[in-house]
Amino acid sequence: MDQCDALNGTPSKRTKLDVNGKYPDNAAKSAEGVYVRELIFQEEHTILDEVAQISEEGKTESDAKILGGDPSCLYLRELARPNVLKLKPYRCARDDYDSGILLDANENSVGSCIPQPDPLHLNRYPDPYMLSIKKLICKIRPIRHEQIFLGVGSDEAIDLSIRIFCKPGIDKILVTPPTYGMYMVCANINDVGVITVPLSPEFDVRIPETLAAVDETTKLLFLCSPGNPTSKLIPNEVVREIFQGGYRGIVVVDEAYVDFSPPEKSALNLLDEFPRLVVLRTFSKAFGLAGIRLGMAVGHPDVIRLMNNCKYPYNISKLTEDLAIRALSDTSIFEANLSLLLQERERVVGILKSLPMVKKVHDSDANFILFQIDFAYQIYKHMAENGCVIRYRGMELFCEGCLRATVGTPKENDTMLQKLQETYNLFLNDSISAK
Ligand SMILES: Cc1ncc(COP(=O)(O)O)c(C=O)c1O
């Protein structure tokens, strides 16, 4: 990429300038919707300008509504880092023109170096906004494309949200252990503090304790639903109670595993109610596409705009785009695989529950099963060294003696269950003979 491409002031073909070379007043409402609005912002305003427009000093949320502005902008002014609000984002060559003789982005015009043909034209940069993928997602989920940020896995969205909302050394995130480790890792990398409010021993969010722990510096509250490693869904009512209980920051609900639960359980259904809700989804689990690295954040268009402004310009590759389009164009394989995994989940849970050596099996809303067994660490290690890798989770809060097994194919599950029993017996006999 040529840095000179940034803010080079070239007229945007997609924003369709009028005869006087101005953006039409209704540009935001054109067929290309918010995408057009995004470009206008990148050229003419920062998000802070819009915030200032609708929320002059002292204006309240209801004033903003009366003024016809979107009150979520007020939250953004309070919540996002000022440098991010002020940011004039990098403009890609492809933001302006994307057809004809393309000598604008210093690509290799002769072609890619892979054996031809190269139907994806990999010598060219991809679409920075991946509208093709977003439109297909909107066909299968109750959301609009301007509510979607696409990232390199949902991990990118976790890191970006922290960088957008948390001032290093000042702001904090709140997590509810036991939970996915990357929230804390990303916070640590960004020098952002972490408040922990443990779940209850039954893996439920403790709402009063959570609300008592936040203050104005707690910019992000991460909930993992279904939880990793808990495998338990967090009901939408919990999210509602957190907002209604007075929390003023952003609630991020990480739904990496929610496709293994009924669709009505998803927090996507709350997005119209709460502009400060961000829902994370991924193609790595139920879609079976962990290898293409594609995840998304779904939220209010203003929050999504900040994420798009801060991402690397061409974060999603054409290879990923191609595969995501194939997966989304025909979801029959997704559905068949999902149904097999759900069937297997029930079968494996049933068998584990019937094994006398298994002390507790947690009900699962995800594609993995958390269970408690004696000799958990030794069993994990011995099984892994003998060709069957599950995960030891015994160091996590309220997971003492727990192993976590991903639901595999029927054959893999049979092998895992057989090895689990054999290995347990091995350690049981060892411990008996040691006495
Ligand atoms: C709860 C949770 N969130 C996010 C991720 C990361 O997903 P991705 O592959 O989309 O980065 C994982 C991965 O295991 C996860 O367990």
Image (cartoon, rainbow, N blue to C red):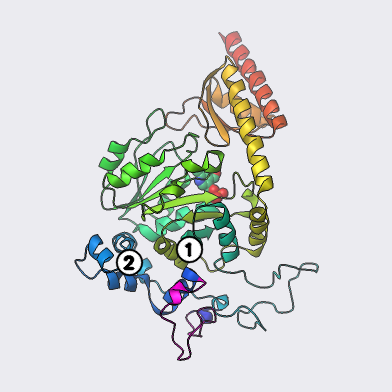
Q: Main secondary structure of the magenta part?
A: loop
Secondary element type, mark 2: helix
Residue 157 visible? The answer is yes
Q: As displayed, is residue 135 above or below residue 391?
A: below
Identify which amino acid the numbered label 2 is placed on: Pro
Rendered image: mark on residue 82: 2
Q: Nearer the viewer, residue 328 or 385?
A: 328
Secondary element type, mark 1: helix
Mark 2 lies within 8 Å of ligand 1 (Cβ measured)? no
Q: Nearer the viewer, residue 128 or 29?
A: 29
Q: Nearer the viewer, residue 214 or 141?
A: 141
* Pointer 1 residue: 146
> In the rendered picture of this protein, how many numbered marks are placed on residues?
2
Q: As displayed, is residue 29 above or below residue 377?
A: below
Identify which amino acid the numbered label 1 is placed on: Glu
Segment colored magenta: 7-32
